[in-house]
Amino acid sequence: MALIHLKSNNEQIAKRLSIPETFHSLDYVRPAFLLQKILCRNLIMWDSIGNTKEWVMSQIPELIREIYMNDFDTVDKKFGMRISLEEIDFATVALCYVNISAGAVFSIGFKYAGTGNKEVRDLILFYIEMFRKVIKTATSVPGTLQSNTEPETKNQVDRATIETGLCVLAFSLSMVMAGTCDIETFRTLRILRKRFEVEMHYGYNMAINMAIGFVFLGNGAYTFNRSDKAIAALLCSLYPVFPNSPSDNRHHLQAMRHFYVMAIETRLLQARDIDTGNFVNI
């Protein structure tokens, strides 16, 4: 649907990709799918994609935002007349918050692919730091993620969700800074690579190394285009479901990871004669 209506700004189609905004809808949501939903919705509503923290926050429904960002007492005051604290699934709310945030930043990566925009770079770096240091990661003890009625465990997110989000943010950063050889971007990606080298998950390491390659695309001579074809190729290449091994094709055909080559364009500045159209030496 996103590719059929890419950049169409069709609100009626975008509304079909619904995001939970009520307690009832939270009971039936799969948080992992919200990343793709937000991305697809924004690819349709292309012109509305912003590049600020305020825009990213606006993508998160007020219900999820209020529950995630406030303490138990504040949540009880705001929603106590509608639902008791014991009935609120804080783990699901936290997963929704994280996935929607990652999807919104991923959308920004597509919108500003190949621009080298440093304001957008700094925004993505902020969210990478948030995912690394601010968001609480649940321990490996069974049942810890569900016991979220204590301040220490509220908003905990499983490690797989955090690391998937970090890979998505790395893709976003590398798309924006593709071919720029930016040192700050490279430093951040090296930190992420060291994090993933500990457990050597194939998909996460693949994502980070792809991102590093994008930053130094063609030794700085190439970057990404933002045509419809290029955006579609990048979406196929950077699909945010990561394999466990090179032969894992259950959710995404691994050969499609190479589709990014169809989005590449040259960054070289070439002078032409205005009358003949021929290249000239300067």
Image (tube, grey):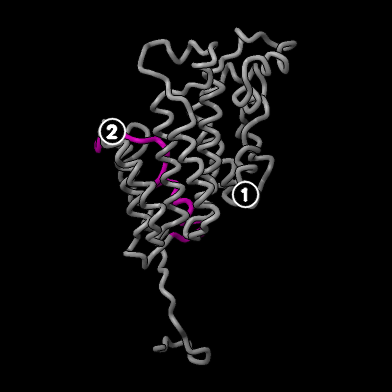
Residue occupying the point 46% across, 25% down: 136
Say if 271 sits above or below 89 in the image: below
Give the farthest residue toward the bottom.
275
Residue 201's disc is: 2
How far from the left and from the top, in percent, is residue 65? 63, 28
> Per the image, is 147 magenta?
no
Q: Secondary structure at mark 2?
A: loop
Q: Percent position (x, y) of residue 277? A: 48, 87
Quarter of the figure with the N terminus: top right
What residue would you read off at disc 1? 50
Report the residue at 39% width, 27% height from top: 160
197 left or right of 80?
left
Q: Residue at x 45, y 15 (%)?
A: 145
- Please state which of residues 111 and 192 is positioned toward the viewer in this rendering: 192
Tell me the magenta residue range.
224-248
Q: Who is closer to the viewer here, 192 or 179?
A: 192
Q: Secondary structure at mark 1?
A: loop
Q: Residues within 10 Å of mark 2 (few under 14, many from 20)?
A: some
Q: Amino acid at mark 2?
A: His
Percent of width and height locating residue 162: 43, 31
x 41%, y 62%: residue: 180
Give the quadrant of the C terminus: bottom left
Amino acid bearing label 1 = Gly
